[in-house]
Image (cartoon, rainbow, N blue to C red):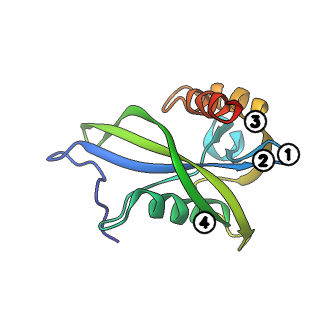
Amino acid sequence: MVYEKYGTKGSPEHKSCGGIVFKKDSREVLLLKRSKEKWGKESWHLPKRTTLSGEKDKQTVERGVLEETGWEVKAFELIGELKSTFRRAGTDINKTTYYYRCEPVKKITDEIEVSHNSVEWVQLDEAIKRTAEYKEAEHEDEILTKFKEHILH
C-alpha cells in the first residue's frame, strides 16, 4: 500500500478520513473501543484510516470503516475536520482527519483491525461523552457534537 499522506520527516503532514456511521432510527453511532488491559487506558474512537495514493476521501472512509469495524458503509457529506499533532521517529507530525456522515449498508465480517478490542453501537449523546474522556489526541467529541447539530437542522 502506498499512503498518500502518511507524515514523514521530509513531509510532516498526515491525512486521514473517518466516518460517523449513524443509524437514524435508533440515533446510534458506531464506535471502536480500546481496553484498559490491552492499551493501558480505556478509550473510544471513531473509525478512520490514512488516505492511500489515488484514493478519494469517501473511498478512504468506506475502506477504513470496513477494515476497522467489519461494516460496509456509504459515505455522504463532509461534517468537518480535526487537527492534531503526534510524534513519529523524532518528528512532529501534523495530522488532519476529515469526517464524513455515513450510513451502514451491511455487516460484512466480525474481523476487526487489531488496534481495537471491540466495535459497539452507542447512542449519539453517550458517544459524545465516551469520546470526550480521551483527550490525548483528536477531540472526536467535538466532531460528534458538530454532527449532532448538523442532523438536528
Camera-nearest label, 4 or 3: 3
Q: Amino acid at mark 1?
A: Ser
Q: Amino acid at mark 3?
A: Leu
- The x and y percentages for residue 40 are 63, 37
What numbered label is drawn on residue 26?
Answer: 1
Residue 9 left/right relative to 57: left
Q: Residue furthest front?
A: 153
For disc 4, the marked residue is 66
Q: Residue furthest right?
A: 26
**Is the C-beta separation of discs 1 and 3 under 8 Å?**
no
Q: Amino acid at mark 4?
A: Leu
**Is the C-beta separation of discs 1 and 2 under 8 Å?**
yes
| Residue 114 seen | no
Position of the C terminus, as image quadrant, is: top right
| Residue 90 seen | yes
For disc 2, the marked residue is 24
Residue 64 left/right relative to 51: right
- The x and y percentages for residue 70 are 67, 66
Residue at image location 45% in from the left, 50% down from the top: 17
